[in-house]
Image: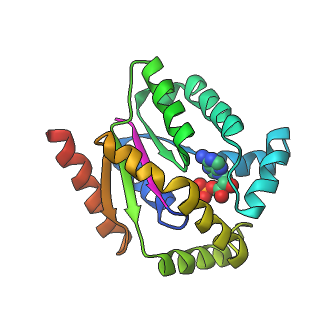
Amino acid sequence: MNVVIFGAPGSGKGTQSEKLIEKYGLHHISTGEVLRDHIARKTPIGQIAKTYINQGQLIPDSLMIRILEEIIDNEPKAKEGVILDGFPRTIPQAEALNRFMARRGDEIHHVIGLEVPEEELVDRMIKRGQQTGRADDNLETIKNRLQVYHESTTSLRDFYISEGKYRQINGHGSVDEIFESIAEAIGDSSEK
Ligand code: AMP
């Protein structure tokens, strides 16, 4: 099973991914984590990524798609089922993902859409910034990230609704309650 976990920044994608990995044994691919790792290792990709991330902007599609393609093609565990967290964020990324999956005779089965009210997103990210020191969890960058999400990423919801893959989840509640809704949505639609 291949799953995309989708939602605004701060919607709980990382937290719910961990629970999905535990229950379904999926391989986690978080493009945000991959980029933060490049920044920490001071690689050429990291140098480029840093400027965009610190401004709350998206890394250009051409670069992001190349990074993802390399992970999908070279990670043996990716063949056993993946959870994509933070990718795709644009329609060209979603189209590229469909091509990469089709190339190996596979597909994305579910897109889990975590829907959370905006004020709660801001509160959660501010708290996370205080707890983890994550550089882009400050109010100014958070505002940019939310704007970018509305401009470039929300259209993916319709893209995946039209593919019949979008599972809308109420992302407001306890971690366990939200996870229960996800498991139900995946289970129900898998049984159809
Ligand atoms: P995340 O950890 O998913 O919230 O990502 C943190 C930051 O990394 C984002 O604000 C973007 O600057 C960058 N990023 C992560 N994934 C992508 C992607 N699929 N496309 C473009 N930029 C991305």
5 relative to 82, above or below:
below
Q: Is residue 41 visible?
A: no
Using the image as rendered, state which of residue 52 and residue 106 is in the foreground.
Answer: 52
- Can residue 27 be seen by looking at this rendering? yes
**From the viewer's perspective, is 100 left or right of 56?**
left
The quadrant where residue 163 appears: top left
Along the viewing direction, whichever of 130 and 116 lies nearer the viewer: 116
Where residue 159 sits in the image (x, y, percent)?
Answer: 40, 44
Horizontal arrangement in the rendering, residue 121 relative to residue 171 (left or right): right
Q: From the viewer's perspective, is residue 112 above or below residue 88? A: below
Question: Which region shows up in magenta?
Answer: 1-7
Could you tell whether 118 is left or right of 40 in the image? left
Q: Nearest the camera: 27 or 51?
A: 51
Q: Residue 152: percent from the left, percent from the top? A: 57, 54
Q: Quadrant of residue 1?
A: top left
Vertical placement of 160 versus 133: above or below? above
Q: Residue furthest left?
A: 192
Residue in the image at 45% along x and 53% along y: 6
Residue at figure coordinates x 51%, y 57% from the top left: 14
Residue 4 is one of the magenta-drawn residues: yes
Residue sitting at x 32%, y 43%: 162
Image label count: 0
The answer to which of 157 and 52 lies nearer the viewer is 157
Is the stretch drawn in magenta largely helix, strand or loop? Answer: strand
Q: Residue at x 43, y 76 (%)?
A: 117
* Position of 92 relative to 107 (above/below): below
User: Would residue 113 be counted in the magenta stretch?
Assistant: no
Q: In this rendering, would 89 be left or right of 50? A: left
- Residue 175: horizontal and vertical position, in percent? 38, 69
Residue 70 location (% of width, % of height): 64, 27
Colour convention: rainbow
State the quadrant of the C terminus: top left
